[in-house]
Amino acid sequence: MEAAIITITFRECVVRYGLSEAEVREFVQLGLLHPAPDVPNALREEPERVARLARLHQELGLSKDSLDVVLNMHQQLEQLQLEVRRQRARVRQLENFLGGLGPVLDFE
């Protein structure tokens, strides 16, 4: 399942996520958020990522360097969880096949 990506203006980020416009611009400069290529002063981003970034920065007071590390670790964790689900499905399929309950399908 792919995450939804939206276009949101810097101003909307200020209102929705409580970030200052200066913080949003700094996060874009640091590569933590991605600018919308076709809309000035806007982001093209997953809403969950923006919300997570705002929460980590505001509630936990993480430094901007730490934010990058935490966000990358979260992304890697999500990828690993997806791979675990895929492998579990393959194991169930193989168990069913060996038990004579059905064919083995390729999940790639």
Image: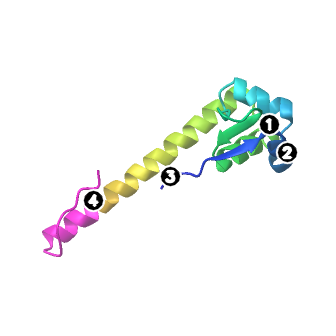
* Res 2 label: 3
Kind of residue indicated by mark 3: Glu
Q: Position of residue 28 (x, y in %)?
A: 71, 29
**Label 1 vs label 2: CA separation?**
14 Å
Q: Which residue is drawn at the image coordinates 21% and 67% (left, top)?
A: 95
**Which sits in the foreground, 3 or 65?**
3
Q: Find disc 4 in the rendering and name its residue.
A: 90
- Mark 2 residue type: Gly
Q: Describe the element under mark 1 as helix, strand or loop.
A: loop
Q: Secondary structure at mark 3?
A: loop
Mark pair 4, 3: CA separation: 20 Å
Q: Give the residues drawn in magenta, as a range.
A: 91-108
Residue 91, labelled with which disc? none
Could you give the CA–CA distance between mark 3 and mark 2, rounded to whole angstroms?
26 Å
User: In the displayed structure, would residue 47 be above or below residue 24?
Assistant: below
Q: Name the residue located 17 percent from the left edge and 76 percent from the top edge.
A: 101
Dot 2 or dot 4: first in sequence order is: 2
Foreground: disc 4 or disc 3: 3
Of labels 1 and 3, earlier in sequence is: 3
Which residue sits at x=72%, y=47%? 51
- Is there CB contact under 8 Å for labels 4 and 3? no
Q: Is residue 29 above or below residue 54?
A: above
Q: Label 2: state its secondary structure.
A: loop
Q: Name which residue lies at 43% across and 52% down.
A: 82
Mark toward the viewer: 1 or 2: 2
Q: Nearer the viewer, mark 4 or mark 1?
A: 4
**Of callouts 4 and 1, the N-terminal one:** 1
Between 75 and 13, the residue placed more toward the observer is: 13
Mark 4 vs 3, N-terminal side:
3
The image's mark for residue 61 is 1
